[in-house]
Amino acid sequence: MRLVAEGLSCRRGARLLFEGLALSVPAGRALVVTGPNGTGKSSLLRLLAGLARPDAGTVRLEGAGEPDDFATEVHYLGHLDAHKAALSARESLGFWRAVLGRPALDVDEAMEAVGLGGLGVLPVVVLSAGQKRRLALARLLVAQRPLWLLDEPTTALDAAAQQLFAAHARAHVENGGLIVAATHAPLDLGPSDALDLGAWRPTRPVAA
Ligand SMILES: Nc1ncnc2c1ncn2[C@@H]1O[C@H](COP(=O)(O)OP(=O)(O)OP(=O)(O)O)[C@@H](O)[C@H]1O
């Protein structure tokens, strides 16, 4: 399996964020995307996830079966954690496990794996910011999907949770998974390439 993007251009409002962007991420490898605020890291991840259309260019996941199946191969973790506030942490994760399909860890195993063992009965609304982020990361573990698209995955995580996350991510890559992660923090995801989106900012014409 390989994620391939070619000739990608992205415009938000009146601003061209990048154009002609190409990337290729094979199975068993991660791509770490960095760049200053506003350079388009989240926008790029949304294009790769199929949540937005590029102004030009294509995205494909080679070796993923039918093109229509693309969405079922992808875990997208955005800025927002996408929990239902009124559910308990266990119920929320169980909901995602049922919806996402291809079950992997069971709910209690995944809660333990992100250090939330014992907190499952709490309503999501009372969890701390870092606990909510841990719960979002647990979603990656309850359903088997090869491509993880992660937007600032370590936001709000303490040092121990960052290490836990990195260990799960490296295991995913070692098992042939693919990861594209946007980050402002150093991330050790195992065999990786780097993409600095700051270098893709279109240059402005120099005023005469
Ligand atoms: N719906 C929108 N309409 C207009 N502009 C938008 C829209 N969404 C995002 N933008 C702009 O697109 C640019 C890129 O935003 P994006 O969130 O992709 O950047 P980022 O690199 O992820 O930033 P950060 O590091 O702050 O998270 C920003 O200038 C933002 O204001």
Image (spheres, rainbow, N blue to C red):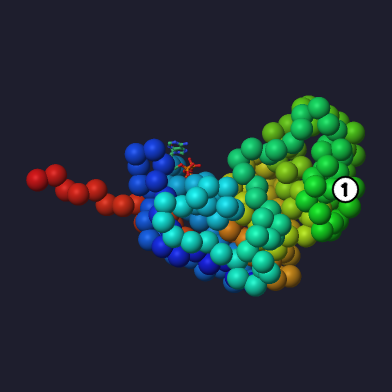
Whether residue 11 sits left or right of residue 31 in the image: it is: left
Residue lying at the far left in this picture: please name it: 208
Task: Check the picture and name the quadrant holding the C terminus.
Answer: top left
Whether residue 92 sits left or right of residue 193 in the image: it is: right
Is residue 116 among what the camera can see?
Answer: no
Q: Residue at 52% of width from left, 61% of height from top? A: 59
Q: Quadrant of residue 178?
A: bottom right
Label 1: which residue? 107
Q: Is residue 198 above or below residue 92?
A: below
Q: Residue at 87% of width from left, 38% of height from top? A: 91
Q: Residue at 67% of width from left, 66% of height from top? A: 66
Is residue 133 among what the camera can see?
Answer: yes
* Residue 79 picture location, percent across and down: 60, 40
Q: Residue at 39% of width from left, 38% of height from top? A: 13
Q: Secondary structure at mark 1?
A: helix
Whether residue 96 sits left or right of residue 206 in the image: it is: right
* Residue 70 picture location, percent across and down: 65, 60
Whether residue 54 sits left or right of residue 112 in the image: it is: left
